[in-house]
Amino acid sequence: MRKKKLFVAISLILLVAALSGCTGAIAWPGLSATAEVAYLAHTNAVYAIDIKTHNELWKFSGAKAGFTLFNTNPSMFIAAPVTTSDGLVVILDSSNKHVMYAVDPKDFNPNDNNPAPKIVWEFSNAKGLWIAPPLEVGNLLFAPNSDGNVYVLDLTDGKSGKQAVEVIAVSQPGGDEARLWGQPVTDGERLFVTALDKTVTAIDLATYKVLWHADLGGAVPGGFALGGDGMLYVGSLAKQLERFDPATGEHTPVLDTNGWIWGTPVADGDNLYFADVDGYFYSYNTAEQKLNWEPVQPDSSITANPLVLGDKVLVATESGKVFAFDSTGNFDVWYTPDQEGKAYTTPVIAGDTVLVAYLESDYYLVALDQDGDKKWNFPE
């Protein structure tokens, strides 16, 4: 039943996003953190939470507009906020407002009834939904949008909210599935972008030119991983893991999976960790080009990326539990929530704290220590 519900939820996200330009309330939260502050995008707001005190510092729900009795165009926040090198936090409004904000997380009045950070700039020239977190490379912000374009913003010229340095088309315009949902990755020379139209693209960082464009057998909602062997690895809804030469785009399938690969593989040395929505967890050795162990199914569907934590790998499942795997494929339950809730979002590490976001729960966020013991939850 759980797998069927997840399949329906994912299908609805794809269908609703493609046809109406709105993700709907079924989308899961986005989570990121610094060592001191957690940033949680949860439906209609982004929350900044002090990790030490557990207190809400501020809540961002978009630019203030004139009062209307009925809000016919509500904001939606589901993408993980991104902290830039100059200390700003980039927030994506995933509704059909099509706005990307940069806020100063330290510029707010704690004495206000509802503290909110100052908006430094906002970019609203995209035509589609913001789903994928942008990637900062040098002084530039590369922001994939569901309109099939990557928008390049200069973070130093003071014009970030006014215009893009470049607009790079990586998917066919007008295509119903030309959606960019995965965060890009770079090898320092090229930017690699995935799309729901079953394609992946490499872009020259110096010229913004498309270097190669390859077709896969299924949509790619997640992103690339750069393996220890220097090759790119990506999964798709074709139930395959593929390996790419980053310079040429030549690729070959290396592994068939039991279910859709929704998330992004995670590389740790020669090992690559990833999961599928049927709930199987995989460990692939890129040097030996084989599985480290047979796929393991802890309990339920997995959409979150794994989190490498020291000598173990944490995996959050739809059941809300977090499992810890060792290097041989043995696992145990690392954390069991004390109430019902679903975990679709990738856990993050903040200092010595592991943060896990929940959906359909009384709380939005749980903070755990390195042993998987609960420290606090938000809201408390």
Image (cartoon, helix red, strand yellow):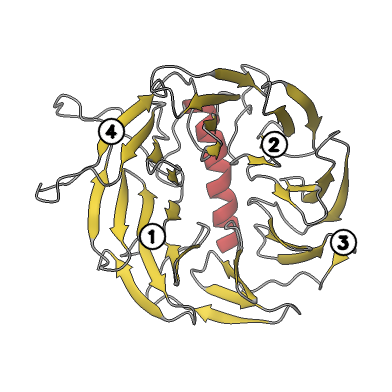
Residue annotated with mark 1: 360
- How many circles with numbers are drawn on the protein? 4
- Looking at the picture, which amino acid does disc 3 mark? Ala
Residue at mark 1 to residue at mark 4: CA–CA distance: 30 Å
- Looking at the picture, which amino acid does disc 1 mark? Glu
Mark in the foreground, 3 or 1: 3
CB-based contact (under 8 Å), mark 3 and mark 2: no
Judge from the rendering whether residue 246 lies leftward or rightward of residue 277; answer left or right: right
Judge from the rendering whether residue 10 lies leftward or rightward of residue 265; answer left or right: left
Picture quarter with the N terminus: bottom right
Q: Quadrant of residue 71?
A: top left
| Residue 35: mark | none
Residue at mark 4 to residue at mark 2: CA–CA distance: 29 Å
Residue at point 73% right, 31% down? Answer: 201
Q: Earlier in the sequence, mark 1 or mark 4?
A: 4
- Looking at the picture, which amino acid does disc 2 mark? Phe
Residue at point 26% right, 47% down? Answer: 106
Q: Earlier in the sequence, mark 3 or mark 2?
A: 2
Residue annotated with mark 4: 119
Q: Who is closer to the viewer here, 341 or 367?
A: 367
Residue at point 44% right, 53% down? Answer: 31
Residue at mark 1 to residue at mark 2: CA–CA distance: 34 Å
Residue annotated with mark 3: 287
Q: Quadrant of residue 266?
A: bottom right
Q: Secondary structure at mark 3?
A: loop
Residue annotated with mark 2: 192
- Looking at the picture, which amino acid does disc 4 mark? Ile
